[in-house]
Amino acid sequence: MEIDYKLHGLEQFHLKMYDDFLYDPLSIPDLIDFFEKAETDGIELQAISSYRGFEQQLTIWNNKATGNRTLLDSQSNPLEFSTLTEKEIVDAILRWSALPGFSRHHWGTDFDVIDAKVLKDNPEYEVQLIPSEYEQNGIFQNLGTWLEENLPSSPFFRPYSKDLGGVAPEAWHLSHKASSYVYEQKLSFEYFNTVISSDFYNTLHLIQIVRENAEIIFEKYVDNISR
Ligand SMILES: [Zn+2]
């Protein structure tokens, strides 16, 4: 099976710049409309992360897999790295960060949003991207409510809106339906296995654990989204 570089953040020539980030060109007209609609409703929608390349995701992964970046449990509480088995480390990373090559952020179709107006009023605040920020009494509560009301009739959806036992709920993570669907269709377990067996993964920490648990990782964390 041939590896499609566009799927894994290994190629970006096909993407276009919008508002400081690279996106799949198909998503840009809808992005413009959606951000304008938010502005009309008093929300200053801003992407704080969009396209991410393989190398960038690999750095995140390796920092977490070696204990250089804090791992969180399902309730967003820090985990004590030294007490975890290698398998537990892999599971803890996957709950919050995608396996390099299999982040939806590699497609230019998915992005994380905040309300920039709220940050202007709270300049000291450091965004964490945790569920409580978007829930009742959270700093982005209004944005959370706005998304709840406006996403269903928009060209976007939240692939991690519910806890399906894999990736933790991410109220901030939006995906452009039409363009992301094109990438999603190419993901099968057979293809996943081919990609993670490739040389791109030679520098991924704990790769042997990932390869040994390939099937469950694919089912739980890759092929497991809310619609
Ligand atoms: Zn995201």
Image (spheres, rainbow, N blue to C red):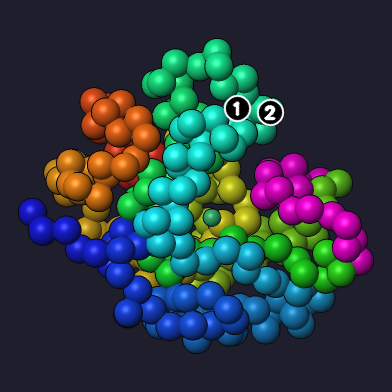
Contact (CB < 8 A) between labels 1 and 2?
A: yes
Please indicate, yes or no, whether residue 16 appears anywhere in the rendered image. Answer: yes
Identify the residue at image location x=38%, y=79%: 15
Q: Is residue 123 magenta?
A: yes
Q: Secondary structure at mark 1?
A: loop
Within 10 angstroms of label 1, few (less than 14), some, or many (20 or more) residues?
A: some
Within 10 angstroms of label 2, few (less than 14), some, or many (20 or more) residues?
A: few
Quadrant in the rendering for residue 217: top left
Q: Is residue 90 left or right of residue 136?
A: left
Which residue is situated farthest in the top direction here?
Answer: 83
Relative to 150, is 164 above or below? above
The Cα–Cα distance between marks 1 and 2, rounded to whole angstroms, is 5 Å
Identify the residue at image location x=57%, y=63%: 49
**Quadrant holding ligand 1?**
bottom right
Q: Position of residue 87 (x, y in %)?
A: 39, 21
Quadrant in the rendering for residue 14: bottom left
Q: Position of residue 141 (x, y in %)?
A: 79, 54
Give the extent of the magenta segment.
121-136
Identify the residue at image location x=66%, y=33%: 76
Q: Is residue 95 magenta?
A: no
Q: Quadrant of the N terminus?
A: bottom left
Residue that numbered label 1 is attached to: 73
Name the mark on residue 77.
2
